[in-house]
Amino acid sequence: MLARLTAMMRTTAARLSALYLLLFAVCAVVLVFYMTSLSARMLTGQTMETINEEVQGLGLAYQRGGLPLLVRTIERRARQPGANLYLIADPNGRILSGNVESLDAGVLEIDGWTERPFAYQRFGEGSGERNRAALEPGARPLDARHNAIAVVLRLPNQMIMLVGRDLGEPERFKVVVQRALMFALGMMCLGALLIWFFVGRRALKRIDSVSEASARIMEGDLTRRLPVTGAGDEFDRLSENLNAMLGRIGTLNEGLRQVSDNIAHDLKTPLTRLRNRAEAALAGKRKPVEYREALEATIAESDQLIRTFNAILMISRLEAGYSAESVTKVDLADAVRDVVELYEPAAEDVGVALEASVDGSFVVDGNRELIGQALSNVVDNAIKYSAGASENPRVIVSLEKTGNEIRLQISDNGPGIPDEADRQRATERFVRLEESRSQPGSGLGLSLAKAIVRFHGGQLDLSANDPGLSVTMVFPDMKGGG
C-alpha cells in the first residue's frame, strides 16, 4: 500500500492535487483564525461601547442625586433581564451593592478597563464563604462559569464602582464561527478528495492509457492510436492531433516504402541497360565513332535516370507538404496558353490537334513553375497516347469555374483507360498500364501532377471521355478571381 502511494505521489496529477489540498487547508485555517479574531474584536468593541453608555448614564445619576441615587439606579438596572454587571464597593473592595456576588481578586485594585477578561459569579450562584475567600488578597481566581470585561471607576468619596458585561454571547458567537469555518474546512478537504478521486484518478488512468499506447507506437506498431473517449476535452483534442500526426507519419512511411520498392524494381532495367551497353562497348575493338555512339547513348540514359530521381524527390517533398518554391498569385489562363504554345509544334509533328478553350482570368494561390510542370506532364501524355489512335486525334485544354472551384481539364480522344480501377492506379508512382508499355516514360508524370495539385490544396481526377481520357485538375478559387 505504501509503495503504491509513493508511486502515485510521483505523478504530476497527484502532486497537483496534494498541493491544491494543502493550499485549501492553509487558506481555510487562516480564514478561521482571521474571522474568529475579527468577530471577537467586533463584539468586544460593541460590548465596550455599551459599557461606556452605561457609565455615562450612571455618571449623570451620580451628579443629580449623589451616591443614594446612584445606588438606587444600579439596583434597578441590575434587576432587569439580561442586565449588565453592576457593583458598588467600599475603598477596601467589599461589595456593598449590585448584582455581582464575587469576582477574581485584584480586579477592583486597578482603575479603568480590565486588562483581560475576569471570572465572576452573580448573586445566588455561589456560597458566601467562597466569595469572601475570592476577595481576599492573594486568593486564586474563582472556578466560575462566567467571564466578563468591565471598567472600574473610583468615586470622589473613594467608593469603587464597576460596570461590566458578560462575554458569554461573544464567546458563543466565536464558537459558532469557529465551528462553521471548521465545517467549511472539512467540506473543502472532502471536496478536494472527491475531486481527486473522481477527476484526478480518471485523468491518471487516461494518461496511463496514452503512455501505454505511446509505448506500443515506439516499439514499432504505427497502426496503434491514442485513445479518444469522445468527451471533447483537452485529452481528446491532444489524442486526435497526435493520431492525425501518426496517420500522416504512416502515410509518409508507406510512401517511402513504395518509393524504395519502385526504385529497386523499375530502375533496375535502365541500370542494366547502362551496364550492358558499357560492357558491349568494351568488348572487342571498335571504331571511334562506335565508341562515341555508345557514350552518347549512355549519357542519354543517365539523363533520363537523373530526371526520374528528380521527379521522385519532387513528389516526396510535395507529398510531405514541404517545398522551397514560392507561392504567389497565378493566372491559370496564362499558364494554359504558355503550355499549349510550347507543345503545339510537337503535337503537329505527330498529327494531333492541340486546342485551348480559355476565356477570362482564373487566379489561384500557387507556384507558376509547379503548375506549368503538372500541366506539361498531362498534356505530353495526352499528345503521346492520342497520336495515331483515331482519324482526327485532338487534345483540348479548358478552364471553367464551378462554385468555389476552378477546373483545369485536359481531354483527348485516344484509347483512354476504360477500367476505373486502372484510372485510380495510373496516378501512382512507376505505374504503367499494359497499353502504355510501348511508349517511353517512367510512370511518374501523373504522380508528379497529382502531388503538385494536392500541394496547391486541390485534387486530380481521371475520368472516361468516350472515347479517350479526361484529366481534371481542381484548384480552390480565390475570392475576386476570374
Image: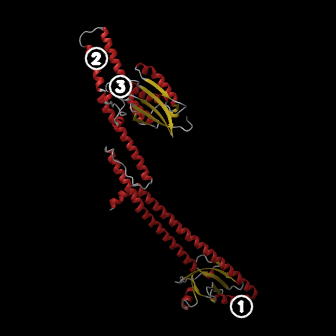
Spatial separation of the CA atoms under disc 1 and disc 2: 144 Å
**Rendering coords of residue 82 (x, y %):** 61, 85
> Residue type at mark 2?
Ala
**Which one is nearer the viewer's eye here, 333 or 359?**
359
Q: Could you say which disc has been placed on residue 441 in the image?
A: 3
**Rendering coords of residue 52 (x, y %):** 68, 78
Local crowd size for mark 3, using a 10 Å CA cut-off: few (<14), some (14–19), many (≥20): some
Spatial separation of the CA atoms under disc 3 and disc 2: 22 Å
> Residue type at mark 1?
Pro
Name the side, left or right, on which 295 lies relative to 82.
left
Q: Secondary structure at mark 2?
A: helix
The extreme left residue here reads 284
Q: Secondary structure at mark 1?
A: helix
Please report contact status of discs 1 and 2: CB closer than 8 Å, yes or no.
no
Q: Quadrant of the C terminus?
A: top right
Eyeballing the image, is 47 above or below 282?
Answer: below
Q: From the image, state whether disc 1 or disc 3 is nearer to you.
A: 3
Task: Give the residue at mark 1.
Answer: 68
Residue 322 appearing in the image: no
Task: Give the residue at mark 2.
Answer: 278
